[in-house]
Image (cartoon, rainbow, N blue to C red):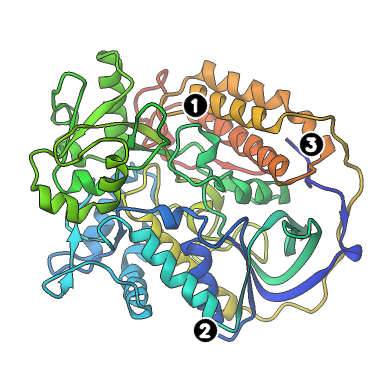
Amino acid sequence: MIGRYLVNFDTRQLPQENWDYVILGSGIAGLYTAYAASRFDRQVVVLTKYTMEDSNTDKAQGGIAAALGHSDSPALHLKDTLAAGAGLCDPEAVNVLVNEGPGRVRELIAMGARFDRENGQLALTREGAHSRRRILHAAGDATGAEIQRVLSGQARLSPNIEVRENHFAVDLLVQDNTCYGVLALDGSSGELRVFWGRAVVLATGGLGQLFEHNTNPAVATGDGIAMAWRAGAEVMDMEFIQFHPTVLSLPGAPPFLISEAVRGEGAYLRNRYGERFMPRYHDLAELAPRDVVVRAILKEMGSTASDRVFLDLSHLDPEKVQQRFPTISRTCASYGLDITRDLIPVAPAAHYMMGGVKTNLYGETSIEGLYACGEVACQGVHGANRLASNSLLDGLVFGGRIVERVNSLPPRRSGHPEFSCRELGDAPEMDVAHLRREIQSVMGKYVGPVRTAQGLEKALAFFEEWAHLAEYRARNVEEMEVRNMLLAGQLIAQAALIRTESRGGHYRLDYPQSRNLWLKHIILRR
């Protein structure tokens, strides 16, 4: 998929708008960046694919990690993050995250975020690979929804922020390695529009929809990574995808995340024979890093000829379980499961992208004027395996740093070049929904939690079969999404084939050991 643009266009013939910031995405990273910029009286437009609440942030259950407890410190949070990252975290990036994070969380609280409290103090819990109780949560297991509520409210109230829902970002407008704006499709009118910006910020989230079994909303199709790649930006660590160990696995039921915090509160993992197995795999048992838990589950599933394992909360206080996990309890009850008594069937599913568009510690990409934060970005803070509940913190901290950097730069000269594309032909009719399912099948089979060179080469051959689509214009959002999925999948498979070892979220059956010579990052560029 080598094409530069997805559609034919000429900016001189399109409606145009000028903004200080053009932000793509309305999760925690995009909305906090918009909020921070608006406080400096900057004019901000937020473009979001569907509604403001369609984001991974809104679905986040477990919480947000910050060293706010009396027995905790940024140094301990740093140590835990580096340990989980399997040798590939950038220590400087992690240092920024853990030291600036508490201030950002206090800012959320000042905005009105209602995190759970006990006896007037923040109710902190513990999750996998954390050495302290440092996870703030809201309404038990609806932390993301509470953060989304607060930030969406700020965006709606600010006279400096305009949110354009139902606007699909098609491509970045880049010339001489400088980003001037964004070409977007207005879903309401069906017309293309141009948004020029002093700063263009990618906050488009992840790519879980590349896999059939995933915890992400329908919008997570890798659009930001794909458009940045087409524009010439560097991407990094694309092989590292985190599969969440415990996602509800019931026939006929959609995937539903069973939060890390369930194991943090003491739940056990059992195989089909009722045996608790995690102590055999790691000293931290159920609180081991996610990649360890996923591989342990896969081994148990294989050795017991089962397609699932089970979470057991029956030994915990029923009243506390219901109070702590109301969303999980209600959802499971709708399928006839009482989580205080019944075993919850679970299996791993695609959850989070550790890699993405390469940035520095201020969100700057390899293209001037283009910034990235949140799950679409990769500054090395998560390494090969993200520590639980660091993702929401990541969006806050590095979104804020983008605004710091833009404010420190001299204003760009006024004016911009014009852009056009005329060479794309009309594609033959195609079944986009079928192709989307094919991508998910190939990714699940060959680029999932367990990989081999043979499988990765089959995946790359599949993507090459569809390379001809780059010669044709995309006619609608569905076709644009599937083009982005093909490109993102190809980048993941390519990086996974290059890394001949196993580390964190990347596991090669043919190279099962970690190797010191691979203590480095794979950076891909067009």
Tell me the amino acid under the disc marked 3. Answer: Ala
As drawn, is 30 to the left or to the right of 164? Answer: left
Question: Residue 471 sits in which quadrant?
Answer: top right
Tell me the amino acid under the disc marked 1. Answer: Gly
Viewer-side label of 3, 1? 1
Residue at left offset 66%, top offset 28%: 435
| Marked residue nearer the N-terminal end (2 or 1) | 2
Residue at left offset 21%, top offset 20%: 272
Number of other residues with Cα within 10 Å of mark 3, as a class: few under 14, some 14 to 19, many 20 or more: some
Marks 3/2: CA distance?
Answer: 41 Å
Number of other residues with Cα within 10 Å of mark 1, as a class: few under 14, some 14 to 19, many 20 or more: many
Q: Which residue is mark 2?
A: 39
Q: Which residue is mark 3?
A: 470
As drawn, is 246 to the left or to the right of 47? Answer: left
Residue at left offset 43%, top offset 57%: 58
Instruction: Classify 152 as above or below 251.
Output: below
Discs 3, 2 touching: Cβ within 8 Å: no
Marks 2/1: CA distance?
Answer: 43 Å
Question: Residue 389 sits in which quadrant?
Answer: bottom left
As drawn, is 175 to the left or to the right of 72? Answer: right
The image position of residue 515, as x and y in percent, is 37, 30
The image position of residue 356, as x and y in percent, is 54, 48
| Marked residue nearer the N-terminal end (3 or 1) | 1
The one of 464 and 341 positioned closer to us in this rendering = 341
Query: Which quadrant holds the N terminus?
Result: top right
Give residue 444's mark. 1
Number of other residues with Cα within 10 Å of mark 2, as a class: few under 14, some 14 to 19, many 20 or more: few
